[in-house]
Amino acid sequence: MNWQIFILLLLPLSLSAQPGGEVVFAGRIVDSEQRGIRGARVVLVGVSEARTDDDGLFRVSIPGSMAEVTVEVDRYEVVYPRSGRTPVPRSAGTPVVIEVKKAEPGEQDKLIRQLQDNVRKLESDKRFNEQEIKRLGQNMQDTIRIFQRLLDQSGNQSATMLDSLQHKIQALMSAQESSLLAQKKQVLYDRITQSMLTFLDKAKNLRDALGRIDDAFLSEKAREGFEKQVFAYNQARDSLYNHHKGYIESVRLFWDDNEASSRMETVCDLALIQIHEGIILPLNDSVIGPMRDAATGQASRMSANRKARKGAHKAMEQLAFPLRNLELKINELSNSLSR
């Protein structure tokens, strides 16, 4: 009898005294009614993992030098021991009982729900269109699944790791949103500045063509050249007129900069009201009209030329300061939008 006690007392000591060897860790996963849970994935954190049998039992080899381990059960929350840490059992024939309860919806599901909440917020943000929001949401769901799969493969489903996953997902969501905004701002910046500079360029070309208005009455080729300048200006003006409200709204939404918004409105007013409506639009009567009258014989070429020359010179004088001012305001606007 004394021999048997002596041997049993020495057994765990002889197992733990082999730092290079292994021992069998035996455990049983049970619910609140102490019923075994079949097929549960059990992770001995940083060591190994196993699956429970029909009675909730599992056995796994671990280094003999370990005195305790942290146990986690996939899709379950460990209720006892509360810390999740348990001593290595003295005998493989006496399993450690680990009570668990069904976990709340998986962290992956929580993250996806959180993502969906973020996407719903974006849907009310006028800066994004439906396709961009859908693509952003899909990218993040794919990222969540990749992270979850990596965690599954590593056998590490600890609260620390899942909390880290959640922070990474939030950071990635924010980064992708910022990246998308930056891309859209760059596209808008290019579009707005190009539209403004094109208008300025065509207005300057038309001004220069007005200085050669006499040639348009002497040469058919010169007249066609003047008409081409008028046509090019009209295209630039129409494009700016059709989009200027959208440009103003885009600057307000994406830059959130009162100074930039004010400059955008100033440039549009200067181009469309002061320059176009105030100076260039009257050319229909003072220059284009006389050219048409000369071509149709309703006025002599000499008198029509004289009237057109007067109107052209007046417009050139009127355009001198507004065009320089417009160029200055476009540069200021470009600097505001490039910040």
Image: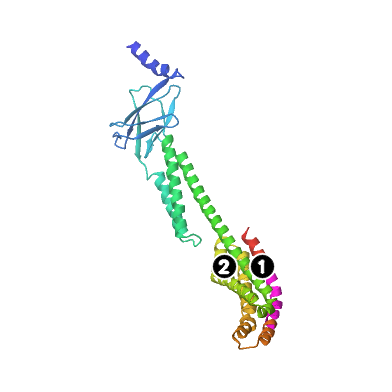
Q: Is residue 23 above or below residue 38?
A: above
Is tag 1's residue or tag 2's residue first in the polypeptide sequence?
Answer: 2
Q: Secondary structure at mark 1?
A: helix
Across and down, in percent, residue 304 comes to 66, 85
Q: How many marks?
A: 2
Q: What's drawn in magenta, residue-wise?
A: 310-328
* Position in image of residue 76 (x %, y %): 36, 39
- Tell me where residue 90 sits by quadrant: top left
Q: Splitting the image into 4 quarters, where does residue 151 fall?
A: top left
Pointer 2 residue = 248
For badge 2, the amino acid type reads Ile
Q: Callout 2: helix, strand or loop? A: helix
Residue receiving disc 1: 329
Instruction: In the rendered view, tell whether residue 165 sits above or below residue 246.
Output: above
Q: CA gap, disc 1 to disc 2?
A: 15 Å
Chief SS of the magenta region = helix
Whether residue 269 is visible: no
Q: Is residue 326 magenta?
A: yes
**Would residue 192 be counted in the magenta stretch?**
no
Q: Quick one: 299 or 240, which is closer to the camera?
A: 299
Quarter of the picture containing the N terminus is top left
